[in-house]
Amino acid sequence: MIRLLALDLGRARTGVAFAQGGVAVPLDSMSGTVDPERLQSELLLLLGERPVDELICGLPIDLRGRQGPAAQAIRDIAGPLAHAVAPLPVRLVDERLTTRVADRRLGEVLGDARARRGRVDAWAAVALLEGVLARITHTGEPGGEIVDPHPCRP
């Protein structure tokens, strides 16, 4: 039974979700990407409490399938994260529409936008994991790409 941890990396907050046995649940939010060392530290603490087989990070790709500055910013963060958690694999997965799906779900339950604000990131991570789990069910593969924890440096 595969255990996955997903991060919806954001500047202010990073949403976290966990999946085991085909069910994804929101955990909480951690520090955003503004302080990468703090993000790594919080992630390592979380991984110490909850062992996983793979870490999934959302990669912002626009609706036309292009990767812009936001995707590059996530790639710049994912490399050091992969190094910090090695040998745990870190996978970048298309996160298109996950925040919209999460906001819609929370809107149905909570209504008020202010009440949703602190929770939407973790629910976006749930939507990301649900997509990965669906791909695994249908193709046997999670999709996305593994981040090299030891990139070559010039």
Image (cartoon, rainbow, N blue to C red):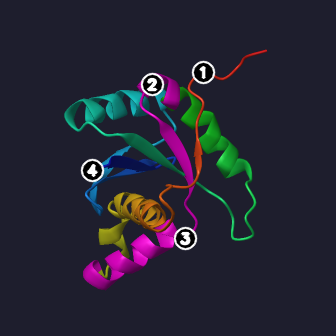
Q: Which residue is mark 2?
A: 86
Residue at the top extreme, as displayed: 154
As drawn, 72 above or below 19: above
**Residue 19 appears in which quarter of the rendering?**
bottom left
Q: Which residue is mark 1?
A: 150
Per the model, the C-alpha gap separating discs 2 and 1 is 9 Å
Q: Which residue is mark 3?
A: 97
- Taking the magenta stretch, the answer to whether it contains residue 23 is no
Relative side of 18 to 76, left or right: left
Q: Earlier in the sequence, mark 2 or mark 1?
A: 2
Which kind of residue does numbered mark 4 sit on?
Answer: Met
Q: Which residue is mark 4?
A: 1
Q: Earlier in the sequence, mark 1 or mark 3?
A: 3
Which kind of residue does numbered mark 1 sit on?
Answer: His
Percent of width and height locating residue 97: 54, 70
Residue stretch rendered in magenta on the structure: 82-110
Residue at the right extreme, as displayed: 154
